[in-house]
Image: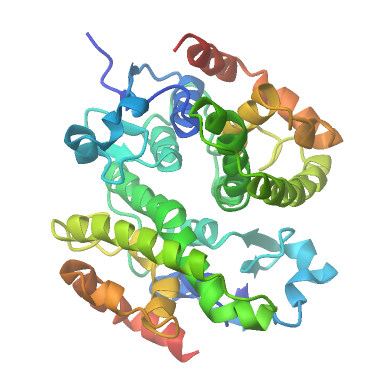
């Protein structure tokens, strides 16, 4: 019987891979249904019914249809609380609040500049879109300032929200993977001692290795 | 114990105030002057290392990012005041979905409008007309999706007011007020009705009076 959990989208999408990493950490079986964005499948009526902004991923299980990767991850942790990594979204309110704080920092401070760089450096060339050097420089500077804050934090704490790997760290995996493994700007991360150490630790988790493997074979 | 909320003159901290009032939690407003650069002072950066607003102090406990703060208090005081999270795991999932929509799809464009129209001259740079035009267009497309959603549902996550609706209050107040683009709300029948509902809540009226 097919798994009730379905994720719609291409594995190459950073937001899709965020959800896949979470499902694998939580040991939740799922079906990945590919969406071909270069053919515009994400803008077709059937997909828009599931995701009215025409963005990936979309998610379904037997009781709900959801979108927004960070919301999907929180839902997965709530619904499947007893499965897989039980610490992923904290086991008490203060731990959860710290994870939410760093998930918001990822969404509001880290994602805009790192996402812009991923687009300019990794996707634009593939899509034959000319790169914007001004945007690259601007976002590199912005990201550098954010990573300076991370460098201090990760000198005091093993992971962003505390001593345990959490959704907050996981949420950073997709963009960072592209920048470190797929562009020549990896040194933004690797030249910062604590950020480099943290990246090495979180990217060598089995769950992330599985997602990277899916991206390569997808 | 009274919760200290920093930077309440500005928009994002008002998200926190609205939540605390809905939950019946006492707070103390602590001013932070952005124009004087108080958010970059060493004392402030110890509390909020990104130099952003707000941060809260609850006794010894410090927390930042307004959307993390409202989640924390909505959950901690779940049985007190307005229920802002829904009554089931599925309802909570929808609240989280629309809270992320606000954070990822709505906020970037309305923030650009706020920055360039309201704060550019105070911060010493010329407003970028191209950014203003593009942000208004993109915000319009997002509001079109909201219009469709709110034609089927009284509030964003369902037929109940939640953190997802609350999160939109501060910057939408700027949009219909000093940004001078109320027409973006009024030209959309269901968005308009929704805005009237959520902005006339006693909690929001109280925030605006502070």
| Residue drawn at point x = 82 percent, y = 36 percent | A194
Quadrant location, the N terminus of chain B: bottom right
Left or right placement of residue B46 versus residue A110 in this view: right
Colouring: rainbow
The residue at the far left in this view is B152
Please name the residue shown 36% across and 78% down the image.
Answer: B181
Is residue B85 something one can see in this rendering? yes
Let me know if residue B163 appears in the view: no
Counting labels gives: 0
Could you say which quadrant of the image residue B191 lies in? bottom left
Q: Considering depth in this image, is A45 or A165 the residue closer to the camera? A: A45
For image coordinates 29% across by 54% down, the residue present is B86
Residue A55 picture location, percent across and down = 35, 39
Residue depicted at 32% across the width and 57% down the height: B142
Q: Position of residue B202 (x, y in %)?
A: 33, 83
Residue B208: x and y in percent read 44, 86
Residue A132 at x, y percent in the picture: 61, 44
Q: Quick one: A6 or A214, which is closer to the camera?
A: A214
Nearer the observer, A31 or B124: B124
| Residue lying at the far bottom of the rendered structure | B209
Frontmost residue, A76 versus B169: B169
| Lateral position of residue B161 relative to residue B40, left or right | left
Please identify the quarter of the rendering in which residue A19 is found.
Answer: top left
């Amino acid at each position: 019987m097919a798994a009730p959990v379905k994720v719609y989208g291409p594995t190459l999408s950073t937001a899709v891979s965020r959800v896949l990493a979470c499902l694998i950490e939580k040991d939740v079986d799922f079906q990945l249904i590919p969406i071909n964005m270069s053919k515009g499948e994400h803008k077709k009526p059937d997909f828009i019914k599931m995701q009215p902004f025409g963005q990936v991923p979309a998610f379904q299980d037997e009781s709900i249809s959801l979108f927004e990767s960070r919301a999907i991850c929180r839902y997965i942790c709530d619904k499947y609380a007893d499965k897989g990594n039980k610490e992923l979204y904290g086991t008490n309110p203060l731990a959860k609040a710290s994870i939410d704080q760093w998930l918001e920092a990822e969404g509001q401070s880290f994602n805009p500049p790192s996402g812009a760089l991923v687009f300019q450096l990794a996707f634009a060339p593939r899509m034959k879109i000319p790169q914007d050097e001004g945007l690259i420089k601007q976002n590199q500077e912005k990201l550098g300032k954010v990573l300076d804050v991370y460098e201090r934090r990760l000198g005091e704490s093993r992971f962003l929200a505390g001593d345990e790997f959490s959704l907050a760290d996981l949420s950073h995996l997709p963009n960072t993977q592209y920048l470190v493994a797929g562009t020549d700007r990896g040194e933004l991360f690797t030249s910062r001692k604590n950020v480099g150490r943290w990246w090495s630790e979180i990217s060598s988790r089995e769950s992330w290795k599985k997602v990277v493997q899916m991206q390569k074979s997808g | 114990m009274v919760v200290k909320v920093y930077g309440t003159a500005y928009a994002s901290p008002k998200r926190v105030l609205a939540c605390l009032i809905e939950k019946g939690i006492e707070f103390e407003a602590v001013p932070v002057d952005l124009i004087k650069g108080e958010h970059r002072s060493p004392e402030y950066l110890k509390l909020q290392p990104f130099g952003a607003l707000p941060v809260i102090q609850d006794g010894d406990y410090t927390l930042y990012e307004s959307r993390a703060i409202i989640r924390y208090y909505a959950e901690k005081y779940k049985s007190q005041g307005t229920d802002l999270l829904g009554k089931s795991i599925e309802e909570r999932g929808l609240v989280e979905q629309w809270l992320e929509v606000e954070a990822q799809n709505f906020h970037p464009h309305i923030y650009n409008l706020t920055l360039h129209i309201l704060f550019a001259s105070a911060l010493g740079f010329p407003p970028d007309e191209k950014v203003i035009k593009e942000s208004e267009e993109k915000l319009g497309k997002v509001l079109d999706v909201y219009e469709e959603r709110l034609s089927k549902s009284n509030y964003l996550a369902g037929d109940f007011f939640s953190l997802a609706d609350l999160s939109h209050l501060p910057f939408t107040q700027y949009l219909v007020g000093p940004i001078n683009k109320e027409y973006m709300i009024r030209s959309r029948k269901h968005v308009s009705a929704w805005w009237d509902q959520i902005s006339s809540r006693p909690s929001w009226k109280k925030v605006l009076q502070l």
